Image (spheres, rainbow, N blue to C red):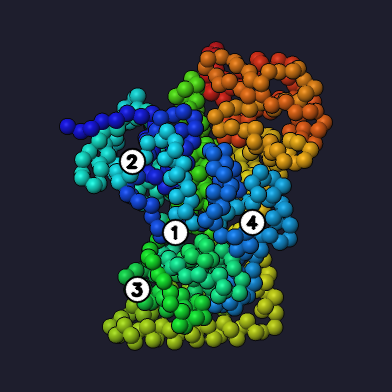
């Protein structure tokens, strides 16, 4: 006989998106269980960029900036992206602390820094500590096996991998966060749209301290040298590095990239032929750009990499998953606790899909555009693929491996020789600087990070430019950060709470109590009043008799220019949001 459990929400997958889902639900008082098939945290780094919006979301869930930053790289490293021949032969750079970029971000943020360069593995450690202190139940070493959907919920069978025993879990809803390689999306019959294979990569995780070796610390080094073309990611310059290089199956095999081969490539890229490279692990991954055809199947919801797979160029993947969870979970509470119509849950997809599709397209464009940099030197990446194809032909295919490696290195050195000569030609250096500067949208993406809006299922961003953001209080927009006190120490975001709705009013209107209770089917609304015509008031963008209602996820739900019938108008607005209004038939 199987063991059995019940919960309100079952979360399949214990990565960042799954854990944020659990923490959101726990803060809302919703019972939830997370299933994670791994017994321990993964050590091989994956994502490394925590965006400004994700930092805001985590702070709202009780994370301090200091604990998030503890294992992140230093601020200067996190701000720099270098384009190089070998790592200390710099062609040019992008510095996100220069040219007013840092100030542009900071004026809109409560946190001291606009982003963190932190390994996903280290972020997961911090999240795991919060999970252990929350009401979320975490089942490690457990694998999901099957769904059975019913009108009142979902029955799942899960298996404990340590001994093979099975457990039946009944939940009202299921959040599928088992990632790109998970099985839940396939079991639900949901297809992905977009290219399944853009490029294959092998990466090596190594733990050398290169902080004193590199001339300039940076979070990314794009290596253009043909013999070792690839990318270094400095998750932490003193102890965590990942080197990515493209490979070309079926002409090349993953197993051909042994630790010895990768050490040789890394030494080439570092121009350090005698350095002992301490490789800890090697991984193969495939770049895709896909979005699921739907994000919901009855009582099951797809979030994070289960719903979308981006190229990592732009750092939008993990951050988009965190945004998914934040959008969905307050709506689950509204249905489970506050009497909202279950149709409210459909707005998870209508609101998130336009954001996700744009992030996917921008990530893909970033990857395509980055090749313009080596292209200035004539070192186009297609030459690497052509070489792989050539080496797979008869009779070269049957040459001894040592001969094939020698021929490959000779060819790549020749390409590198001509690239170096090309760089010395008049005007090429200036052209390189222009090409690198044109990559700015890949890294300065405040418009994508803070500027997306949830309005009528369409993007309603004030500016269509990735590098621009104009705060506003139009419905759907992120409620702006602004100082409440004269000293600028108290942020408007400190008054927002994921477990409540917030109404902003001016002191020239009727004096309201700190909360407004409307009906049993609607949530209590917290009231914040600030002085009319104060500096803080200017950020609300409303008249002296206006009001702004903010959702639990920090996006504006509704605003009005008149509070003459505030209680009635507020009730009508919330009933519309909760889809409670009865449709009148003629």
Q: Residues within 10 Å of mark 3 (few under 14, many from 20)?
A: few
Name the residue carrying label 4. Answer: 444
Circles 2 and 4 in contact, beta carbons < 8 Å: no
The residue closer to the viewer here, 269 or 249, is 269
Circles 2 and 1 in contact, beta carbons < 8 Å: no
What's the residue at 74%, 18% (across, down)? 511
Q: Is residue 174 above or below residue 413?
A: above
Between the residue at mark 4 and the residue at mark 3, the CA separation in whole angstroms equals 36 Å
The residue closer to the viewer here, 569 or 75, is 75
Q: Residues within 10 Å of mark 4 (few under 14, many from 20)?
A: many
Q: Position of residue 42 (x, y in %)?
A: 38, 55
Q: Is residue 529 left or right of residue 14?
A: right
Name the residue carrying label 3. Answer: 258
Give the mark toward the camera: 4 or 1.
1
Between the residue at mark 2 and the residue at mark 1, the CA separation in whole angstroms equals 22 Å
Q: Is residue 503 above or below residue 350?
A: above
Circles 4 and 3 in contact, beta carbons < 8 Å: no
Name the residue carrying label 2. Answer: 139
Name the residue carrying label 1. Answer: 45
What's the residue at 65%, 84% (across, down)? 424
What's the residue at 35%, 84% (across, down)? 404
Looking at the rendered structure, the secondary structure element under dot 4 is: loop
Residue 78: which disc? none
Give the mark toward the camera: 2 or 4.
2
Between the residue at mark 4 and the residue at mark 1, the CA separation in whole angstroms equals 23 Å
Between the residue at mark 3 and the residue at mark 2, the CA separation in whole angstroms equals 35 Å
Give the mark toward the camera: 3 or 2.
2
Q: Which of marks 1 and 3 precedes in the sequence?
A: 1
Looking at the rendered structure, the secondary structure element under dot 1 is: loop
Between the residue at mark 3 and the residue at mark 1, the CA separation in whole angstroms equals 19 Å
């Amino acid at each position: 006989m199987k063991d059995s459990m019940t919960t309100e929400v079952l979360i399949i997958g214990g990565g960042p998106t799954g854990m944020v889902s659990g923490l959101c639900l726990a803060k809302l008082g919703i019972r939830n269980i997370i299933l994670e098939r791994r017994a321990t945290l993964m050590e091989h780094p994956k994502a490394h960029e925590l965006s400004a919006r994700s930092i805001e979301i985590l702070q709202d869930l009780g994370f301090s900036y200091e604990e998030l930053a503890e294992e992140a790289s230093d601020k200067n490293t996190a701000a720099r992206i270098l384009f190089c021949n070998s790592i200390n032969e710099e062609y040019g750079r992008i510095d996100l602390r220069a040219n007013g970029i840092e100030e542009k971000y900071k004026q809109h943020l409560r946190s001291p820094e606009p982003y963190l360069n932190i390994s996903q593995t280290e972020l997961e450690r911090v999240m795991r500590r919060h999970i252990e202190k929350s009401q979320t139940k975490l089942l490690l070493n457990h694998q999901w096996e099957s769904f059975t959907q019913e009108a009142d919920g979902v029955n799942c069978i899960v298996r404990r991998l340590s001994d093979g025993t099975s457990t039946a879990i009944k939940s009202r809803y299921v959040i599928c966060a088992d990632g790109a390689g998970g099985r839940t999306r396939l079991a639900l019959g949901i297809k992905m749209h977009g290219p399944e294979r853009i490029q294959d990569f092998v990466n090596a995780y190594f733990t050398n301290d290169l902080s004193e070796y590199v001339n300039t610390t940076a979070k990314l080094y794009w290596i253009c040298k043909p013999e070792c073309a690839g990318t270094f990611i400095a998750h932490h310059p003193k102890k965590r590095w990942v080197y990515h290089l493209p490979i070309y199956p079926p002409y090349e095999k993953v197993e051909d990239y042994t630790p010895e081969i990768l050490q040789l490539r890394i030494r080439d890229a570092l121009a350090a032929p005698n350095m002992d490279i301490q490789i800890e692990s090697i991984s193969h991954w495939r770049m895709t750009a896909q979005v699921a055809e739907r994000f919901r199947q009855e009582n099951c919801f797809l979030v994070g990499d289960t719903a979308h797979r981006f190229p990592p160029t732009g750092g939008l993947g993990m951050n988009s998953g965190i945004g998914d969870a934040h959008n969905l979970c307050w709506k689950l509470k509204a249905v489970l606790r506050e009497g909202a119509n279950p149709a409210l849950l459909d707005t998870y997809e209508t609101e998130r899909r336009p954001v996700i599709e744009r992030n996917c397209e921008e990530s893909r464009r970033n990857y395509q555009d980055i090749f313009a940099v080596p292209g200035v030197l004539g070192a186009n990446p297609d030459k690497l693929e052509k070489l792989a194809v050539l080496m797979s032909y008869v009779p070269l295919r049957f040459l001894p491996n040592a001969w094939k490696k020698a021929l490959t290195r000779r060819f790549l050195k020749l390409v590198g020789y001509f690239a170096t000569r090309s760089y010395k030609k008049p005007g090429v250096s200036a052209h390189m600087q222009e090409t690198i500067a044109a990559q700015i949208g890949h890294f300065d993406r405040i418009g994508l990070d803070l500027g997306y809006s949830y309005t009528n299922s369409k993007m309603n961003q004030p500016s269509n430019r990735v590098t621009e953001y104009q705060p506003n209080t139009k419905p759907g927009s992120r409620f702006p950060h602004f100082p409440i006190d004269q000293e600028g120490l108290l942020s408007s975001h400190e008054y927002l709470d994921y477990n409540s709705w917030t109404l902003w009013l001016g002191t020239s209107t009727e004096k309201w109590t700190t909360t407004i209770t409307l009906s049993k089917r609607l949530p209590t609304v917290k009231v914040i009043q600030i002085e009319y015509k104060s500096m803080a008031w200017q950020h609300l963008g409303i008249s002296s008799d206006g009001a702004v209602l903010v959702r639990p996820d920090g996006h504006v739900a509704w605003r009005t220019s008149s509070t003459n019938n505030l209680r009635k108008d507020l009730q009508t607005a919330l009933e519309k949001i909760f889809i409670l209004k009865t449709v009148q038939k003629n």
